[in-house]
Amino acid sequence: MKPTILILLVTCLLVACNTEKKKTNQKPNNSFEISEFSKSDLVDLPYQFPSDIQHYLDTCDKPWANQMAGTDYSYLGMEKETGEQFYGKYGKPKAMSDSAFTLFSANYEAANAKDYILKRAQGEQVVIINEAHHKPKHRFFTRSLLKELYGQGYRYLGLETLTNRGGMADNELNQRKHPVLNSGTYSKEPQFGNLIREALAIGYTLFPYEGEGNGKPREINQAKHIAAFMENNKDGKYLIHCGYAHATEGMMGNSWEKAMAGRLTEYTGINPLTVNQTKFDNRFDAGYLNPLSQRLELTEPTVFLEENQLSYLGTRNDSAFDIMVFHEQASYQKAKPDWLDENENVWVSFPDSLINLGKPFFAMAFIEGEEIAEAIPYDLDILTESRDSVLLALKAGNYILHFQNKNGKALRANLKVNK
């Protein structure tokens, strides 16, 4: 018989927001219940322990080692460590001159990015929004658009991450209503899993569109896959979530000639509304921000509009994109960025002494009813010797908590997060 510890009620620790960043949607104190804390079988973890990521960095001499390590850190929600690998190895950009910033300030006015995108999307047929593949915040932002876009008639969501190869494709995704580890590549990151999960709950039909080959052939094939899907599914509008430059319109000036977005216009005759989240993004250190972003004090995703209410696009003002989103710098609750407690989420925190499992260990919250061996956790945390409590960003509902350490021990508990 497995030993069981019963914890009747634990009051949730809601960490106060950074006083330098005032949030209008801060939530009241919440409570949660943990019960049936018991030993568990191990699961095949799809994530790397930080020490293993560091070992990879120490022993791999390939030029892409930092990006691979940074991506692995991003799956753990370790935003600072991710940023150090993607940006910290390079020099900081030059500062923007006072005269240039004064000119910008005179010609552009700040507006809420979500509100502006939704307003522009009303009259469109296709919206394409990009992400940096190591930035969960970008998926979190796209997720915030889903409900209102659905109300505007958007019914189909194309995701670059989804596997699109014959028998490997997740053909049950739309019926199952939640992603699994084999659904795609970057979708094993919790915020990407939540984007997929919420889109399905709202009523979107999801589809893969990844293209065969690299470079120009890949862009062409991505666009052809999307165009073919559109031809066969005409009962709604289309939202496409892609990586980086795939959302670029017009001529690229490189071997691609045109990116996926430009090819899609070529094949369908539709001019998509394109949104860039990657150019004016946040950084792990303010010194690595784009020079313009360094001069701004943002508290939310923002666009800057000229007198005709068109978005500032950066120095390449040639219709490569329609909207440029500026993301705010994050402050942190312990090791986690504070944007995680927006929308429906609240902080759930409890001391590691309740778990009594040797560090380091993973703490993963799975939605009740999803198969733990293959599902994507709603959120996860990694406790090393420097941390003494688990911190998760969860919405109200029932979860299975799974804890697993590096020495082959695991525990589970039931968790109920109250509204």
Image (tube, rainbow, N blue to C red):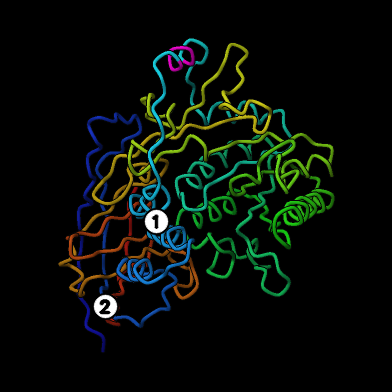
Numbered circle sitting on residue 260: none
The answer to whether residue 260 is above or below residue 26 is below
Looking at the image, residue 399 sits to the left or right of residue 161; the answer is left
Spot occupied by residue 286 in the image (x, y as percentages of width and height): 33, 36
Q: Say what secondary structure mark 1 lies in.
A: strand
Which one is earlier in the sequence, the residue at label 1 or at label 2?
A: 2
Viewer-proximal residue, 266 or 114? 266
Residue extent of the magenta highlight: 100-104
Q: Which of 161 and 340 lies nearest the eye of the viewer?
A: 161
Mark in the foreground, 1 or 2: 2
Residue 209 is drawn in which quadrant?
Answer: bottom right
Which residue is denoted by mark 1 in the rendering?
397
State the count of labels: 2
Q: Is residue 231 magenta?
A: no
Residue situated in front as seen by the camera: 115 or 311 = 311
| Mark 1 to mark 2 CA distance (whole Å) | 20 Å
x then y, percent, for residue 52? 34, 71
Residue 212 point in image, percent of width and height: 73, 62
What's the residue at 24%, 55% (across, down)?
Answer: 349
Q: Secondary structure at mark 2?
A: strand
Residues under numbered marks 1 and 2 in contact, where contact means CB atoms less than 8 Å apart: no
Callout 1 amino acid: Gly
